Image (tube, rainbow, N blue to C red):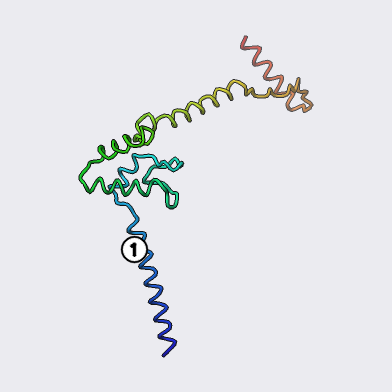
Amino acid sequence: MPGKMRRFKSSLLILVVAVAALAQTASEKPSVDVRRVGARLQCQCGCKDSVATCSMLECHFSKPAKERIAQMQAVGMNDEQIVQAFVRDYGIAIYLAPPNAFGWIVPYAVAGLGMALCLLFVRKYYKPKPMADLGVIDVDDPELAKYQEQIEKDTANLD
C-alpha cells in the first residue's frame, strides 16, 4: 500500500507541475490581434524580427510592447492608431511595412537575370572542340574498292 501511495503522490506532483507550466505559457502567449499589430512593428532589442516574432527570451522590448498593444486594444484603439502611437514614441524606424509586389518580384527577377547572364557567358566562351583530322582513309579491302569504283561512276554520271 505505501508503494501505491508514493506512486500516486508523484503522479499528482507531475500533473500539478505540468498544469502550472502550461498555464504560465498560455498566459504569456499573445492573442491573434496582438500578433497582427506586433507584426507591423520592429523589435528594438537589436534583432531584425518584428515585435510579434522576436525570439529573444525575456526580450526587454517585445514583451512590454505586446502588453501595451493589448492594453490599447482593450481601450478600443484600432490597428492604425496603435501603430501611429508607437511611431510617435519610437520614430519611423519601428514601422515595418507589409511586403508589396515589388518585394515579391525582385528575387525572381534577379534569379532570372542571373540565369540569363550564365547562359550568355556559356554561349560566348564555350567552343566545341573540332574533330581530329583523320585525313584520307586508305581502303585495303577489295570488296570496298569495288563499291568505291561504282560510287565514282555514278557520281560522274550526275555531272
- Relative side of 78 to 98, left or right: left
Label 1 crowd (10 A; few <14 / some 14-19 / many >=20) = few
Q: In this picture, is 115 found above or below 19?
A: above
Could you tell me residue 24's position as x and y percent? 36, 61
Closer to the camera, 91 or 48? 91
Could you tell me residue 67's position as x and y percent? 31, 49
Q: In this picture, is 150 found above or below 96?
A: above
| Quarter of the C terminus within the rendering | top right
Closer to the camera, 4 or 70? 70
Closer to the camera, 91 or 96? 91
Circle 1 — which element?
helix
> Looking at this rendering, what residue extends furthest in the left direction?
76
* Residue annotated with mark 1: 23
Tell me the residue at 39%/70% (across/down): 17
Tell me the residue at 44%/87% (across/down): 3
> Looking at this rendering, what residue extends furthest in the front direction?
89
> Looking at this rendering, what residue extends furthest in the top direction?
159
Tell me the residue at 28%/48% (across/down): 70
Number of labelled discs?
1
Tell me the residue at 39%/31% (across/down): 103
| Quarter of the N terminus within the rendering | bottom left
Could you tell me residue 60's position as x and y percent? 41, 48
- Relative side of 56 to 38, left or right: right
Could you tell me residue 96's position as x and y percent? 36, 36
Q: In this picture, is 91 found above or below 73?
A: above
Q: Amino acid at mark 1?
A: Ala
Q: In this picture, is 38 found above or below 20?
A: above
